[in-house]
Image (tube, rainbow, N blue to C red):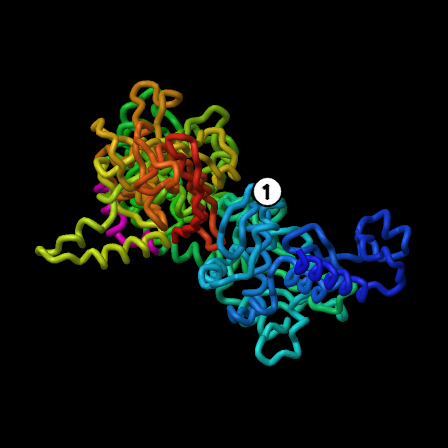
């Protein structure tokens, strides 16, 4: 108690030194607006720096950081030195701490508290910042967690005189780390454009309430059906500061183009197309939807987004479509698709003298991104009967091609027109030891190499793994994580947070405990009777069906969770999820959002175990980046 009183007294002394006009004995308590007006102190407009942990506001960074150090055990400058953070690392640290506090989670150890007050009581000095530094490697924390956070644009100048902490806010460092930015100096009002190579901020992704959320600018350039701000994020200093303002400018468009060039260029490899066409589950589902629904295809205008070799366009033409617009962004594959259409007598000749006399003239291949289609051909809005595309990536949403499909839908599909496929669903289930590499390493020609297996499993908890899981290795039921109606969904619904409840699954009735090492995600897409009235079909990537080239997406827990049926006799004193008290249910909160790196996705995983008697245990959130 005496220590707390000393800390409060010291904080109040620092506050008094910042105020210039009022030395009233009660001024140390005058933080509210009404009292500031009565005493003549600074109002809320002047107290611009909000504490990282509570609602207190201060007029300078130094005072705020002293308050955080004395009251909340958070030594900002000390932590910067310990972690060796430069300006941008420090920038990330502020956003990281704010995101954790918003979720009532300790920034240092990851413990989740029930309330803000409990968090204040829990806060402690950091013992090991290695895990935090690893989290700060994620560029999502370059995005301000709190709007108009003056702290982000002011702490850089406080350390200019320190030789051992190079965090000065200068143009050379900005050019080196950010590349193509615009420096808007308050004194000159001039914009200086600098060249860039690498910085990519195509989405604003935050960690909020313990999970990923995404916000896009309502004004900006359009690429792949999504909006990007022309000045993506403005790092504005307070007007009374004589400090440069930095904002991301043309780099977004430049780097997205660079990523797109690499992405579409990768599809110039015939090996990729052979793998996809050879995936009979995939190709047969599309073939059945197109060839076995004559009432849908006969005489229809079809648009194929991302046609590749043109296999789906060929199916559509074979099924009786009157026109097939095949869009392909890879220059090489657009030429290949054109030649294939010609070789099969299905190419639409541009002049009377061109083409084979047996050519039905329905396929037109256009080399462009769908967002730029208007620049290549004239096509009336809302004139397409059917929009078909094989857009799915790993974990359904990797590659972010769905945004392009939705763009085409909203621009050219007739009202009530058909989407093929028209539904998509992501499933989740828990997997056991057989879904890991542990069994392999436990017996290598009779030798025990399980130490390798344990290390491999530990490493797997840091990254998503694309692999096949046998359905026999699932230790929980499967649950629907998220469903999409592709005919009606909005583009921003691509990014989501969803919950799921998994129950321990046992084929026998001995009620023994087993270990759940993580969760596996897969998807189904449906060609439903809404449009495919004669022959609806489903394309499934489930562990219960024949494998596909998508495999499944595996997210490994940092520590295995013991699970058992609700009839297991658990020990009351044991932690939930241990062998003595296995969880009968696993509660999940999973967020999937487009990452800052274009065409990649971020996945956050929050896990809680519930014992048969209702006790609950939560584990720290895990962040996976699928690149």
Q: Quadrant of the N terminus?
A: bottom right
Q: How many marks?
A: 1
* Residue 370 belongs to magenta span: no
Query: In which image quadrant can residue 76 be found?
Result: bottom right
Q: Is residue 269 magenta?
A: yes
From the image, give the main secondary structure of the stretch colored magenta: helix
The residue closer to the viewer here, 53 or 198, is: 53
Residue 326, position in %: x, y? 37, 40
Q: Looking at the image, is 599 positioned above or below residue 505?
A: below
Task: Identify which residue is drawn at 86% across, 47% down.
Answer: 34
Res 514 → quadrant: top left
Indicate the position of residue 355 as horizontal and vertical percent values.
30, 41
**Residue assigned mark 1:** 115
Q: Residue at x 64, y 63 (%)?
A: 69
The magenta-colored residue range is 266-279
Of residues 223 and 302, the one nearer the viewer is 223
């Amino acid at each position: 108690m005496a220590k707390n009183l000393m800390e409060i007294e010291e904080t109040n002394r620092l506050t008094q030194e910042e105020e210039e006009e009022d030395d009233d004995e009660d001024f140390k308590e005058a933080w509210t607006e009404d009292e500031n007006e009565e005493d003549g102190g600074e109002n809320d407009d002047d107290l611009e720096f909000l504490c990282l942990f509570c609602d207190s506001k201060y007029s300078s960074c130094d005072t705020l950081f002293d308050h955080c150090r004395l009251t909340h055990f958070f030594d900002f400058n000390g932590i910067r030195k310990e972690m060796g953070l430069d300006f941008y690392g420090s920038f990330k640290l502020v956003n990281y701490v704010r995101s954790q506090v918003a979720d009532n989670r300790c920034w240092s150890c990851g413990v989740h508290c029930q309330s803000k007050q409990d968090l204040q009581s829990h806060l402690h000095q950091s013992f090991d910042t290695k895990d935090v530094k690893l989290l700060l490697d994620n560029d999502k924390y370059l995005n301000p967690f709190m709007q108009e956070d003056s702290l982000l644009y002011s702490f850089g100048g406080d350390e200019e005189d320190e030789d051992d902490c190079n965090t000065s806010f200068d143009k050379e460092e900005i050019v080196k780390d950010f590349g193509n930015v615009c420096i808007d100096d308050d004194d000159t009002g001039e914009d200086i454009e600098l060249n860039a190579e690498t910085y990519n901020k195509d989405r604003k992704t935050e960690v909020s309430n313990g999970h990923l959320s995404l916000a896009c600018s309502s004004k900006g350039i359009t690429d792949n059906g999504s909006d990007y701000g022309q000045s993506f994020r403005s790092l504005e200093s307070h007007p009374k500061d004589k400090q440069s303002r930095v904002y991301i400018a043309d780099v977004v468009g430049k780097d997205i183009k660079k990523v797109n060039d690499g992405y579409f260029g990768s599809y110039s490899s015939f090996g990729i197309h052979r793998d996809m066409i050879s995936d009979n589950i995939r190709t047969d589902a599309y073939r059945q939807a197109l060839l076995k629904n004559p009432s849908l295809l006969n005489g229809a205008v079809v648009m194929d987004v991302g046609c590749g070799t043109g296999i789906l366009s060929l199916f559509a033409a074979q099924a009786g479509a009157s026109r097939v617009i095949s869009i392909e962004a890879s220059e090489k594959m657009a030429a290949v698709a054109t030649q294939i259409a010609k070789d099969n007598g299905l190419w639409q000749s541009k002049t009377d003298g061109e083409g084979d006399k047996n050519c039905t003239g329905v396929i037109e291949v256009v080399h462009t991104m769908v967002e730029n289609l208007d620049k290549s051909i004239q096509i009336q809005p809302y004139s397409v009967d059917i929009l078909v595309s094989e857009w799915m990536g790993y974990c359904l949403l990797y590659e972010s091609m769905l945004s392009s499909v939705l763009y085409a839908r909203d621009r050219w599909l007739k009202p009530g027109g058909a989407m093929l496929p028209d539904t998509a669903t992501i499933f989740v289930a828990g997997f056991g030891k057989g879904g890991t590499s542990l069994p392999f390493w436990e017996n290598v020609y009779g030798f025990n190499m399980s130490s390798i297996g344990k290390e491999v499993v530990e490493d797997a908890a840091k990254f998503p793994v694309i692999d096949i899981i046998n359905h026999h290795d699932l230790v929980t039921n499967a649950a629907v994580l998220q469903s999409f109606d592709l005919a009606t969904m909005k583009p921003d619904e691509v990014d989501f947070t969803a919950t799921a409840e998994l129950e321990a699954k046992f084929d026998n009735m001995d009620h023994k405990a087993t270990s759940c090492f993580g969760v596996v995600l897969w998807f189904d897409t449906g060609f439903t009777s809404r449009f495919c009235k004669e022959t609806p079909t489903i394309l499934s990537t489930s562990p219960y069906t024949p494998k596909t080239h998508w495999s499944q997406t595996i997210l490994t827990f940092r520590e295995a969770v013991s699970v058992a049926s609700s009839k297991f006799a658990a020990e009351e004193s044991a932690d939930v999820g241990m062998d003595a008290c296995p969880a009968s249910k696993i509660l999940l909160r999973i967020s999937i959002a487009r990452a800052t790196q274009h065409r990649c996705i971020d996945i956050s995983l929050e896990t809680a175990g519930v014992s048969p008697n209702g006790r609950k245990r939560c584990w720290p959130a895990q962040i996976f980046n699928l690149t």
